[in-house]
Structure formats: structure tokens, C-alpha cells
Amino acid sequence: MAATSHVSNVRSLYKRILVLHRFLPIDLRALGDQYVKDEFRRHKSASPDDVKGFMKEWENYKDTLQVQVLESAGKIFRSTKFGTDLSEEKLSHFQEEQIGQLYELMLESTKTNRQFDIQGDSK
């Protein structure tokens, strides 16, 4: 039963994050959705210790994004800053591969001609 509860918690978190991404600018949403899907898929068979940290960090992300989405209601997306800075202490716990992923994500999310330059419907 504990395994069923865990799976339910993971799915619930995953779905909530994707719902929150609907409120991001479309290019950031595409980037974020793909990253979340890849990360959750990559951690399907992670050790219990890794899963604990994984879930904690994604819960923090969800909470931060939820606050930022609510604060941005009614504002122009481009004037809203989404995300947060990472502390030196948190960065010191990252593995080399994670630092590389983070760097690539930062480059993609801050460049003017993003890979995911998607146009919304012009209705």
C-alpha cells in the first residue's frame, strides 16, 4: 500500500507541475514540460534515498512556481521573472552531470532565439 501511495504522490506532483507550466510563456512552458518529463522518466528506478531528495526539490519547485504564477496574474509575462537563484551550498551538492544539465537549461532559457520558439494561436 505504501508503494501505491508513493506512486500517487509522484503522479500528483508531476501533474501539478505541468498544470502550473500552462501559466508560463509558451516558450518556457515547452522547455519546462520537456525537462520535467525527462527528469521524472530518468528517476523512475532511482534509489529510495535519491527519490527522497528528488521529490523534495520538485515540491520546492512546485511551491515556488505556484507563488510566482499567482503573483504574475494580470502582468505581462515578459516583465515577470520565473525561477529562483541556487545557493552555493546547493550547487556544491550537484554532480558534474547535473551542473552540465543546469548550465544547458540556463543557456536555453535565457537566450533570445530559443530552441522552443513556439507561437501561440493568433485567434
Image (cartoon, rainbow, N blue to C red):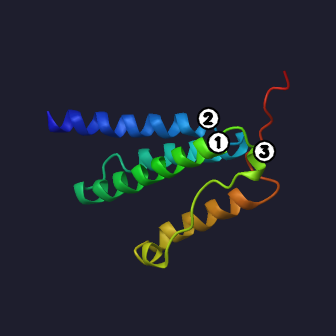
Binning the other alpha carbons within 10 Å of mark 2 as few (below 14), some (14 to 19) or many (20 upward) gives some
Pointer 3 with pointer 1, Cβ within 8 A: no
- Quadrant that contains the C terminus: top right
Residue at 50% x, 42% y: name it.
37
Residue named by callout 2: 22
Q: Residue at x 61, y 68 (%)?
A: 103
Residue 9, given in percent of the width and then of the height, sits at 31, 38
Picture residue at 33% right of the left edge, 59% below the top: 53
In x, y percent, where is residue 8? 30, 33
Q: Quadrant of residue 29?
A: top right
The answer to whether residue 3 is left or right of residue 63 is left
Is 38 in front, or is 91? 91
Of pointers 3 and 2, the one earlier in the residue sequence: 2
The N terminus, quarter of image: top left
Q: Position of residue 22 (x, y in %)?
A: 61, 35
Decide which of tag 2 and tag 1 comes sooner along the chain: 2
Give the foreground label among 3 and 1: 1
Q: CA distance from mark 3 to mark 2?
A: 16 Å
Q: Which residue lies most toward the left here? A: 1
Q: Is residue 28 left or right of residue 15?
A: right
Determine which of the numbered discs, if any, sits on residue 29 in the image.
1
Question: For the residue marked with disc 3, what is the amino acid?
Answer: Asp
Q: Which residue is mark 3?
A: 117
Residue flagged by tag 1: what amino acid is it?
Answer: Arg
Q: In front: 103, or 28?
A: 28
User: How many numbered marks, from 0 up?
Assistant: 3
- Mark 1: which secondary structure? helix
Q: Are marks 2 and 1 in contact (CB under 8 Å)?
A: yes
